Amino acid sequence: MRGNGSKDGSQQASDRIFTVPNVISAVRLCLVPVFLVLLFEGHDLAATFLFALAAGTDWIDGQIARRTNAVSRLGQLLDPAVDRILMIAGVSGLFLTGRLPLWIILVVLARDLLLLAGGAFALKRYRVRVAVVFPGKVATTLLFVGFAGLLLNWPLVPGLGVVDASWLPGLNGQTCSWSIWFVYAGLALALATTVYYVGTGLSRIRAARRAHVEG
């Protein structure tokens, strides 16, 4: 639902394909399978580095696109898609290695699939696009930091011990990664921004329908 560098939608998107931001997004996409191989082979430090590199360069390609007027229609689709793919790969890898409970995986996957499918439908059917909001970027950053910490799996800290549920790491008494608190904060903010994206998208779709009928 966003494009690299056009956060407020103020820049005109071009039809160019081979732009620097698009190349960066493509490289980020190529890092995903390498990250998964390293994680499953037990190379936590290398996997964490690649994940952090792929996540961190999202900010770089956005800055380049905005400052060099390199916003493209491909980038408006590719950039958020790579974010979602990286997020899905991260949580799936953490689940398969036993570092993240299933419910967090389901929430992240459901949200990302909703935004991907809903954004693609609104763009194709009604030519409606909802630009990213700053809290949405903060939510993504918090989740990426949290997942990177879980990938590194160090240092481990004792849980608060306020519940006995094994599916609430950090709140139960078991030791866990410090970064679980970033995951919780990112989830809360991500759900709040999802309500905004869905509400705004539906409002713009209704407006597009009215304009079509009146036209």
Image (spheres, rainbow, N blue to C red):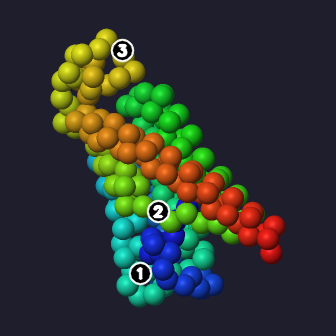
Around disc 2, counting alpha carbons within 10 Å, would you say few (fewer than 14), some (14 to 19), or many (20 or more)?
some
Of the two numbered discs 2 and 3 in the rendering, the one whose residue sits closer to the viewer:
2
Distance of mark 2 from mark 1, alpha carbons? 14 Å
Mark 3 secondary-structure assignment: loop
Residue contact at pointers 2 and 1, CB within 8 angstroms: no
**Residue hosting label 2:** 132
Q: Is 90 located above or below residue 136 in the figure? A: above
Residue found at x 51% / y 70%:
3
**Picture quarter containing residue 147?**
top left
Distance of mark 2 from mark 3, alpha carbons? 35 Å
Q: Nearer the viewer, residue 118 or 151?
A: 118
Q: Who comes first in sequence, dot 3 or dot 1? A: 1
Residue found at x 34% / y 36%:
184
The answer to whether one can see residue 162 in this image is yes
Q: Residue 129: horizontal and vertical position, in percent?
A: 60, 66
Distance of mark 3 from mark 1, alpha carbons? 46 Å
**Picture quarter containing residue 164?**
top left
Label ID, residue 165:
3
Tag 3: residue type? Ala
**Residue hosting label 1:** 66
Q: Who comes first in sequence, dot 2 or dot 3? A: 2
